[in-house]
Image: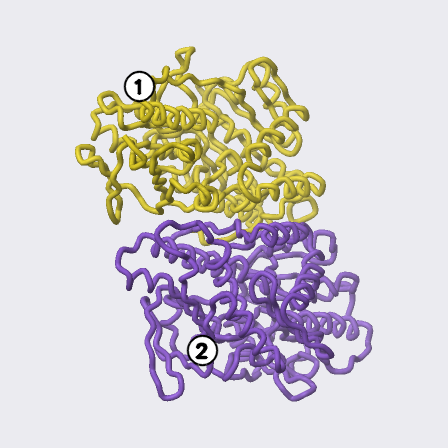
Chain colours: A purple, B yellow
């Protein structure tokens, strides 16, 4: 192998971008393929969906990030299939040859056999998802302001968030903050604080992967923002004007015009394609089962990482679909490629959990750092610090700090624009 | 008349918002109706279209701006007609009664009898226009990077801007800046500096309403950014893949995949409706002819202001469709309403031209302050100062300063995201 060893990376998310950056000094030619021209800081997408940040605040143009990396080119394109024998990725408008292929195309939300729910309960994964959800939330308050009928008004002021994981908790908290703080004095016919925000979770607590007592602390913080948490609750129907759920033996319907989905994830369609081509298996969530070194069995030249990869941690539990896992896998993948070229071997990938955290509104969060649990204001400060540390690695992310400081001081959210059409 | 005197304002642009704010202490009930939930700082829209600013940087939620103004409510709705006898505005979903009606719904771009050109040569008036144009410009460079055929590549790297007024000049300058500065080192197959940027103007100079020597200075600044100015040029055809124009007796076709329209404006459709209902006339550009006090003849209770109003200045020339005119008309309209309630009269509206300016790229501009002409860096500083002064009146506009400072220091444009679909 030589400097002409071709590494093709599909996906410019946390995993793919980290791999590309870690290959900066490797004797390889890197091609990063993405359908979008930017890397997205997904953990803050809920802030865009609730008008706290602008899309550009959490997105970095891939070309700008990789500008000075001479061995790397960015290719805006959509992979549609694989020719493993010919070692080529098929694009919608061309082919890209590879020596090593890394697939890191992530996940989409999943409706557990009810794809028809998506139009009434959109999920949050892309910039367009976020601005569409922002549109829905803001329009709901506008419709409530105009509504004459009390029942109609109440339905517009009812927000249901399905799924009590970090995304659901953060979304519910941010909607609570909108209603209780940001919108103060903004309306004449309604009191935005009368908004009803329901967070539905199927197991017995929110943030179920977090250690005790963080789920209870998170629930308490949510309650302070007017969010009603309903645990042990299974959604059985989603409609344009409401949702039906079962809690124990009781079934209940709630009229609500805004329903948001934060319950399930499934691997991107390319996961199934690469698995079929390589004879690999996928799990129930559509993620590709990988070897301990993140390659596919029988295909050491193909790696799958990030949300799209199914791998168990040292404790036997599946690694979660979070940025941290994708980043560490990306670093490992780059090291593996470098080691092979140098004729060395590497021990299997090992995930080091540096902690998990979720924010609830303006100045509350829960943080599980492994050796320490934090909640409330201290957790929020840690959350802020870690996220800013991450963000400032990319150009212009200082602006997020300025925007947040401003939002914090003024309790305002200035990016609350209703843009685009309902069909966008 | 009493505190229950109802003022209905259609449109939350410069004119409408200024009127509402100037009525803050008047004994009236103000209803501001807009289809959008934000006020847009249109003079900076070209910065959004070229990735320098985010939409939220130049848009302020109307409810936030008017939050503390107790006599005013904001109504998100679309006016569809008028019942002048009943003194009611008809909305798509209701009616709003008024005692005084102010129509300030502005203008849209106009294709001089060729509405079919719009899809291939979009104009710049709304946030959606700006993000769609941003998408086109950025995708053109991406397509060029992928193109194999030199002619195809050249067509993707050719940008035609039709119209050499302030918007066209600013757009052309910003595209030049993208190509020559921002994209430096971003591509591997193309040199973005090879982009060809054509600015077509029908009369004999750019910025024709500016005094000598500013048009020539602007043209020189544009040339430094790689913009070719073609004056005395009439566009005769616009297609998806190019444009045909006549210069003197010569007709020429240019292959170009990005064509932007900055040539004509026409009054919003509500202008025609109010004119028909009130028996007023409209001019060729669809603007409503108003009396010297901005009311309609025979209908003193109806005022039309801003881009939608046709009125001549003291020099006999029509007042231009710029923010400054709309703002001064808004202040006058509020004063007139207050005077009438107090039983007083006002002299006719008189426009005071405080100056005009246009920017060309990163540190150049032309400014006509009446008593002084500026160009280059000094003009740019004045432009920056005046625009920031304006912007900081609204909350969070400090961020624009931070973003600009950052862009200026790094020569970067961080909001260059390709979002939405081609149909958006």
Residue B97 image offset from top left, x and y in percent: 25, 39
The residue at the point 71 percent across, 79 percent down is A370
* A331 versus B309 height, above or below: below
Task: Return the residue nearer the eye: A256 or B70.
Answer: B70
Q: Residue furthest top?
A: B315
Q: Secondary structure at mark 1?
A: loop
Q: Quadrant of residue A65?
A: bottom right
Q: Do marks 1 and 2 share a chain?
A: no
Residue B343 is labelled as none
Using the image, determine if residue B323 lies above or below residue A217.
above
Q: Nearer the viewer, residue B2 or B411?
A: B2
- Between the residue at mark 1 and the residue at mark 2, the CA separation in whole angstroms equals 62 Å
Which residue is label 2 attached to? A230
Provide the chain ID for the residue under circle 2: A
- Please tell me which residue is depicted at 37% across the width and 67% down the height of the picture: A120
Residue sitting at 42 percent across and 11 percent down? B315
Residue B234 in the figure: left or right of residue A206: left
Q: Nearer the viewer, residue A192 or B329?
A: A192
Q: Is residue B357 left or right of residue B8?
A: right
Where's residue B188, x and y in %? 67, 51
Q: Position of residue A66 (x, y in %)?
A: 69, 55
List the residue tagged with mark 1: B291
Q: Residues within 10 Å of mark 1 (few under 14, many from 20)?
A: some
What x and y, as percent, mark residue B217? Answer: 62, 20
**Where on the picture, by quarter, is residue B377?**
top right
Q: Nearer the viewer, residue B253 or B37?
A: B37
Name the element at disc 2.
Answer: strand
Q: Is residue A93 left or right of residue B334?
A: right
Mark closer to the observer (1, 2): 2
């Amino acid at each position: 192998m030589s400097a002409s060893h071709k590494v093709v990376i599909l996906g410019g998310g946390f995993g793919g971008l980290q791999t590309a950056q870690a290959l900066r000094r490797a004797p390889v030619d890197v091609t990063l393929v993405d359908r979008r021209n930017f890397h997205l800081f997904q953990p803050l997408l809920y802030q865009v969906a609730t008008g706290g940040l602008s899309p550009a605040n959490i997105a970095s143009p891939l070309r700008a990030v990789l500008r000075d990396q001479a061995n790397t080119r960015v290719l805006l394109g959509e992979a549609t299939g694989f020719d493993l024998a010919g070692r080529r990725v098929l694009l919608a408008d061309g082919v890209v040859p590879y020596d090593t292929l890394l697939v890191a195309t992530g996940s989409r939300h999943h409706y557990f056999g009810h794809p028809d729910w998506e139009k009434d309960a959109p999920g949050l994964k892309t910039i367009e998802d976020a601005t569409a959800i922002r549109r829905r939330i803001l329009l709901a308050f506008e419709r409530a302001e105009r509504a004459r009928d009390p029942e109609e008004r109440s339905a517009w002021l009812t927000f249901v968030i399905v799924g009590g994981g970090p995304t659901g908790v953060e979304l519910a908290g941010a909607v609570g903050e909108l209603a209780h703080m940001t919108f103060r004095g903004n309306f004449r016919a309604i009191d935005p604080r009368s908004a009803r925000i329901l967070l539905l979770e199927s197991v017995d607590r929110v943030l179920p992967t977090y250690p005790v007592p963080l789920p209870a602390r998170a629930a308490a913080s949510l309650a302070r923002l007017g969010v009603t948490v309903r645990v042990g609750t299974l959604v059985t129907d989603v409609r344009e004007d409401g949702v039906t759920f079962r809690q124990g033996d009781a079934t209940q319907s709630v009229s609500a015009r805004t329903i948001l989905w934060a319950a399930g994830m499934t691997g991107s369609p390319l996961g199934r394609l690469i698995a079929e081509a390589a004879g690999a298996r996928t799990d129930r969530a559509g993620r590709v089962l990988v070897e301990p070194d993140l390659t596919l069995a029988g295909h050491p030249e193909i790696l799958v990482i990030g949300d799209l990869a199914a791998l168990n941690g040292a404790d036997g539990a599946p690694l979660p679909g979070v940025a941290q896992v994708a980043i560490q896998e990306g670093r490992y993948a780059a090291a593996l490629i470098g080691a092979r070229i140098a004729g060395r071997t590497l021990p299997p990938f090992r995930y080091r959990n540096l902690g998990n955290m979720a924010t609830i509104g303006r100045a509350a969060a829960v943080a599980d750092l492994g050796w320490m649990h934090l909640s409330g204001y201290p957790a929020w400060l840690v959350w802020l610090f870690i996220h800013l540390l991450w963000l400032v690695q990319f150009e212009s992310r200082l602006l997020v700090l300025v925007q947040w400081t401003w939002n914090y001081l003024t309790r305002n959210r200035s990016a609350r624009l209703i843009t685009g059409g309902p069909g966008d």
